[in-house]
Amino acid sequence: MRNAAKTGNSLHVYWRLLGYTKPYRLRLAVGILAGILVGGSLFASLRMSPAVIGLLAPSPVAAASAAAPVAVPAAPDSPPAAVPAVEPKRDPLASVKKWAGHLGIEVTRPDGSMTAPFLLILMFAIPFCFLLKACGSYLNNYCVRWVGAHVIVDIRNKLFDRLLGQSLGYFGKTDVGSLISRCTNDTAQIESAISQTVADLIQSPMEIAAAATFIVLTTIEYKLFSVAGALFLIFPLIILPVIILGRRVKRYARRSLERVSDLVSRMQEVFSGIRAVKAYHTETFENERFTTSSRTYFRTVVSTMRYELLMTPLMEVVAVTSACAFLVYCYHLRIGFDIIVPVGAAAMMAYRPIKMLARVNNNLQRSAAAAERIFAILDTDTALKEKPDAVPLEAFRDRIVFDNVCFAYNPGGLPVLSDIKLDIPRGTVTAVVGLTGSGKSTMAWLLARFYDPVSGRILMDGHDLRDLRIASIRRLVGVVTQETILFNDTIASNIAYGTPGATREQIMEAAKKANAHDFIMEQPEGYGRVAGDKGCNLSGGQRQRIAIARAILRNPPILILDEATSALDSVTEKLVQEALYRLMEERTVFVIAHRLSTIQHAHQICVLEQGRIVERGTHAELLAMNGDYHRLCESAQFGVEPAPASAAG
């Protein structure tokens, strides 16, 4: 039952992969027809082979069939002598003579030798059949591999698109290295399998069918049904190793893909945290861990390789043994040379594609294991659901309301926010402060609808965010996070990220407002300078100013500033704050900060403690309460001076 379930699962995977060929069905059909042409040309050459052998070396059976029985004269007074009946045999040249007769061509002379016209035609016909076979093989391989390459591109694009559509919670629970491995190694495994096997998968059965059809027709013509039965009994024995070992290949191939995912994950983690590795001098420790993972991967690769390499020798042993048994059987039946050679040649020609199918099976098992892992992602949908009747919100005009919002990252887990009630009028600045883990950033992510509340609702101009189109929310909300996200692209491209139609003048103006233009122009490349991976070519303060310039350029009506000035020195912070204040005019700003200078001019300040709002008011009002906000202002959290300019950049 388990094996049947696995077989059914593999068939389902293959069927899904086949579904991706639908847009390219015309070219695939050409490839299939080319494969049929290969089989047809092979069959034609096989059909001519008995005649060629019969013409060059007539067998005793053919000679006996051509010779007429000799009548023995009987004595006058004696009864007629019984003449031994010679069983008539089919003339191996009969089909050729019939075909040539239609064309008015003589096959043999009176002495039994081949005529020159027929020999000339034969010498052209056989190479022509193999020319057709070569052309069909080329078209088959080209068309099918072309389709396979496009299928892999489509799968990889769909996989990337599906990952982009997953929720933030999905990426928090899933190892990024594993996702990278599935997008690269798993798709490469399928690509390799398709490019190497799909053409053979179409062509090889055609060749096997041609050889098998020739054997069946030949044995029917010569009434050698036992020979056909023997050959078709041998065939299952040859493919038995393919069936048995193929299952093990798939099992270990899947384990191999899992192990290589571990390797990629380990490399991604170490290289992303290389500063910590260097700081704590753990290079040797990380190297040992990576070496252990590499050895585990090596063992799975060797296990897969062992069964793959065992398959072909087993097939050869079974095939040679079966061929020897077949020859002994033919000798026992006294079958002529002109029949054994063509039938045996057909069987040998069928063996090559059968052997190719063994390789095909190995690659298909590998691709099935990779495809199952890919389809597992494609079948996962954690994206926030947009209602079918969701409405667009073209502009923000009134207010944002948190109405008894509760939230937890895990279903049934501890709440991060509880009973949040907050009214944010348009054009005001709302600041949220609190200790680490109090839920400040979570409120911001709910406002941007990266998550949905567990209970309660968030209203924008009276509309529940869950009733709005996600694209319209993203268009209205701009975000500058504490963790600056820059891409390995030019500074101009990083500033214009999210605003693809921005001109160079607009980019420069945004950079000037964010106090970034001067340090950008200090370098010869200017705005064409590459920021590097995660902005590694820039200092922390420079990266933050580029991110702020990006938000300024986008110019959204709602801004979320998650400790947006945390990496700025005091001089730059003042300049950027002035730019942000100008940007805040007639805009709604949601600020999360640990710096007093960022929030002291806010219209309202909310103090969070363990996911609840415990205080709210202006800076002066909260100080007068002499409560949690007053203690925060006196603590090191708000009291430490920023780092000098040389350190912060």
Image (cartoon, grey):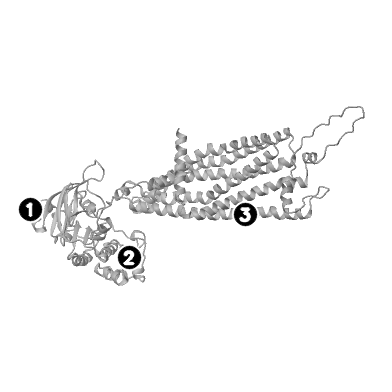
Structural distance between the alpha carbons of marks 3 and 2: 51 Å
Of the pair 557 and 585, the residue shown nearer to us: 557
Circle 1 residue: 625
- Residue found farthest to the right: 76
Left or right: residue 339 compared with residue 76: left
Residue holding disc 3: 134
Q: Residues within 10 Å of mark 3 (few under 14, many from 20)?
A: some
In the picture, residue 425 is in which quadrant? bottom left
Q: CA distance from mark 3 to mark 1?
A: 91 Å
- SS state under label 3: helix
Say if 553 sits above or below 627 in the image. Answer: below
Q: In the image, is 125 to the left or to the right of 504?
A: right
Say whether marks 1 and 2 touch (CB < 8 Å): no
Position above or below: 315 against 484: above
The N terminus, quarter of image: top left
Q: Amino acid at mark 1?
A: Met
Q: Let me know if residue 294 appears in the view.
A: no
Number of numbered discs overlaid on the protein picture: 3
Question: Marks 1/2: CA distance?
Answer: 48 Å
Q: Amino acid at mark 3?
A: Ala
Report which quarter residue 553 is drawn in. bottom left
* Viewer-closest of 52 and 296: 52
Label 2 neighbour load within 10 Å: few <14, some 14-19, many 20+: few
- Circle number at residue 500: 2
